[in-house]
Image (cartoon, helix red, strand yellow):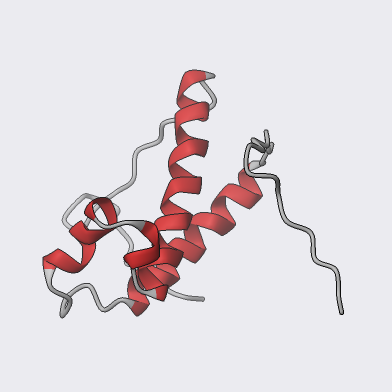
Amino acid sequence: MIKAKELKDDAILNIQINKSYYMMAKAASYVVLKSLNVETQKPEYFTELMSKKYEDLDDMQRVFYTLILLLSEAEKQATENKLFNEKEILERGDENYVEPTLD
C-alpha cells in the first residue's frame, strides 16, 4: 500500500506566482489550444467548457479549462493590484512590423 496526499475538501490556497510562472502557464495554454485544432473543431466543443460539468469534459477540455481558470485568477488579481504594464504590439500592416519567428 502507498500513501498519497490530497487537499482537504474545504482547502483554499493562496499561491503567489511571478511573471515567469504566469508566462509558462500562458505558453502551456497556447500549446493545448493548438493541439485542439481550433480551425477544425466545432464551436460547441469550446462552449461546452462553460456549460458542461468538469467531469463530463474530455481530457483535453479539462486541461485547457484548468489552465484558463488559473490564468483568469492571476489576471484578475494583477488587475485588482495594478500589476499590469500595458504595451503596444505592432500588427501586420503596421509600420516597422516584423514577422515573428521561432528562433
Q: Is residue 9 left or right of residue 68?
A: right
Front-lying residue, 48 or 76: 48
The residue at the point 42 percent across, 74 percent down is 59
Label count reads: 0
Q: Is residue 66 left or right of residue 93?
A: right
The answer to whether any part of residue 103 appears in the image is: yes
Q: Quadrant of the N terminus?
A: bottom right
Q: Quadrant of residue 100?
A: bottom left
Q: Position of residue 23 (x, y in %)?
A: 55, 52
The residue at the point 80 percent across, 66 percent down is 4
Q: Quadrant of residue 12?
A: top right
**Which residue ends up furthest to the top in the rendered image?**
81
**Which residue ends up furthest to the front in the rendered image?**
1
The residue at the point 47 percent across, 56 percent down is 67
Task: Look at the picture and state if 97 lies above or below 78.
Answer: below
The residue at the point 39 percent across, 73 percent down is 60
Task: Look at the picture and state if 7 lies above or below 45.
Answer: above
Front-lying residue, 25 or 84: 25
Q: Is residue 5 left or right of residue 26?
A: right
The answer to whether any part of residue 84 appears in the image is: no
Q: Position of residue 48 (x, y in %)?
A: 22, 60
Task: Look at the picture and state if 29 lies above or below 1.
Answer: above
Task: Look at the picture and state if 85 lies above or below 99.
Answer: above
Q: Is residue 87 left or right of residue 78?
A: left
Q: Position of residue 10 (x, y in %)?
A: 63, 37
Q: Position of residue 85 (x, y in %)?
A: 48, 30
